[in-house]
Image (cartoon, rainbow, N blue to C red):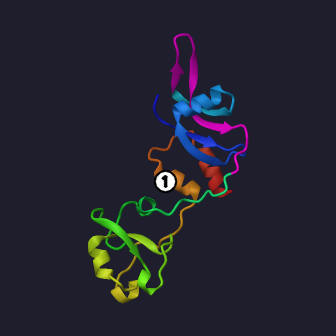
């Protein structure tokens, strides 16, 4: 019993992703409703079979005060797909402040990018213009839904209607 299950709030907005075991327990205890089952598999006991959850909706609304993506080194690397934003290589990576901290640059989503050590050393304590470097793509703060969609690995087909609908709303 391995795999991931999309968990929706009572209003059908995506909350998180959990294990099949946790999702089954929530449904079995009546705390969640099964919306989509995995058509390829099922859970079996000695005497009974249950659908394998793919998408569940919790029955009581959960107020989530902050649903943004947390600014961490790991999440910056994920946002930038593990590539240097100057030359595009995927090894010896570090973080670079576009506006250096010594010049008032803050550690924010829009000021941090993934850079290889060579490009970071070339840029040094300069701005992009001063160093003569160009970004492959501008940095941005990812939305929670986009982060779920892009960074969970294999996306189940049963999830797509729920993630696509909330990205538009």
Residue lying furthest top in this view? Answer: 47
- Range of magenta residues: 41-63
Observer-nearest of 70 and 44: 70
Q: Specify whether 20 is left or right of 89.
A: right
Q: Main secondary structure of the magenta part?
A: strand
Res 81 quadrant in image: bottom left
User: Where is 158 relative to 73, above or below?
Assistant: above
User: Where is 161 relative to 68, above or below?
Assistant: above
Name the residue located 33 percent from the left edge and 81 percent from the top edge. Answer: 123
Q: Which residue is mark 1?
A: 150
Relative image position of residue 29 (x, y in whole percent): 66, 27
Q: Is residue 42 a member of the stretch shown in magenta?
A: yes
Relative image position of residue 70 (x, y in whole percent): 53, 60
Q: Is residue 37 a member of the stretch shown in magenta?
A: no
Name the residue located 61 percent from the left edge and 34 percent from the top edge. Answer: 36
Residue lying furthest bottom in this view? Answer: 130
Name the residue located 26 percent from the left edge and 74 percent from the top edge. Answer: 118
Res 50 quadrant in image: top right
User: Where is 97 relative to 68, above or below?
Assistant: below
Assign a secondary structure to mark 1: helix
Res 66 quadrant in image: bottom right
Name the residue located 52 percent from the left edge and 11 percent from the top edge. Answer: 46
């Amino acid at each position: 019993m391995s795999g991931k299950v999309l968990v929706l709030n009572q209003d059908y907005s995506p909350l998180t992703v959990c294990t099949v075991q946790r999702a089954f327990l929530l449904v079995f205890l009546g705390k969640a409703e099964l919306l989509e089952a995995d058509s390829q598999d099922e859970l079996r006991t000695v005497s009974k079979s249950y659908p394998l959850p793919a998408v569940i909706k919790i029955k009581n609304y959960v107020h989530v005060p902050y649903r943004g993506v947390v600014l961490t080194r790991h999440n910056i690397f994920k946002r930038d797909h593990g590539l240097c934003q100057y030359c595009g290589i995927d090894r010896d990576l570090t973080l670079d402040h576009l506006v250096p901290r010594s010049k008032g640059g803050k550690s924010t989503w829009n000021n941090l990018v993934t850079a290889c050590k060579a490009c970071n050393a070339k840029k040094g304590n300069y701005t992009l213009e001063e160093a003569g470097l160009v970004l492959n793509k501008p940095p941005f703060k990812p939305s929670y839904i986009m982060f779920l969609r892009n960074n969970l690995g294999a996306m189940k087909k049963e999830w797509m209607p729920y993630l696509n609908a909330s990205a538009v709303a």
